[in-house]
Amino acid sequence: MSSPRPFVIRSSPIAGKGAFANRRIRKGERLVEYTGQRISQEEADSRYAEVPGVPHHTFLFTLDDDTVLDATTGGNTSRYINHSCDPNCEAVIEDGRIWIYALKNIAEGTELVYDYRFILEERHSPAAKRRYPCHCGSKNCRGTILARKR
């Protein structure tokens, strides 16, 4: 019989705490809902103002143009799933909710990661990239959690 939650939280080599598979996870499995207080983008900006020279860190997840989830309030363990440029999970928005799914089979003990693809409207200057660093260690690492500009 499998555990109700397919992962445990512990110290991560990527950043702070991370989520690690406590059993084999199958590709396509829905792992957890990303939860948090529903707030406006304006409220998110006021709660987590950018500080020049300080790397960005929040538990915010944009749901749509009007709504952001702040997992600091009302969030669950999904907030500890770290970013990687070589993800084994993905976040999917379904009916106004955010779910984390396995992109591939994941072995027990493996850290669960998804590509945050953080949207930044401004130019991706070297200074901007330093505010949003990636430490995933992947051979495909782009050095930032920012989404590629199109």
Image: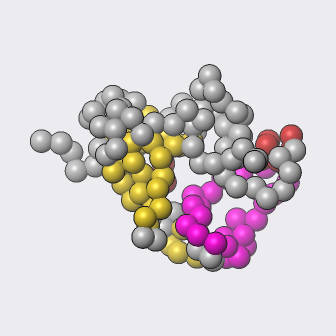
Above or below for 147 versus 111? below
The quarter of the displayed image where residue 46 is located: bottom right
In the rendered structure, the answer to whether residue 140 lies left or right of residue 109 reads right
The quarter of the displayed image where residue 134 is located: top right
Q: In which quarter of the image is the N terminus?
A: top left
Above or below for 142 versus 128? above
Residue 117 position within the rendered picture, expressed as x and y whole percent measured from the top left: 63, 48
Residue 11 position within the rendered picture, expressed as x and y whole percent measured from the top left: 47, 37
Q: Which residue is located at x 66 percent, y 52 percent?
A: 118
Depth check, front residue: 114 or 131: 114
* Most common SS among magenta residues: loop
Specify start and end residues of the magenta stretch as a single range. 41-65
Depth check, front residue: 127 or 98: 98
Q: Which residue lies furthest to the top in this view?
A: 139
The quarter of the displayed image where residue 83 is located: top right
Residue 132 position within the rendered picture, expressed as x and y whole percent measured from the top left: 73, 46
In the rendered structure, the answer to whether residue 14 lies left or right of residue 18 reads right
Q: Which residue is located at x 70 percent, y 65 percent?
A: 48
Q: Which residue lies furthest to the left in this view?
A: 1
Please indicate, yes or no, whether residue 75 appears anywhere in the rendered image: no
Please indicate, yes or no, whether residue 104 appears anywhere in the rendered image: yes
Above or below for 35 versus 31? below
Residue 29 covered by magenta stretch? no
Q: Which residue is located at x 34 percent, y 44 percent?
A: 28
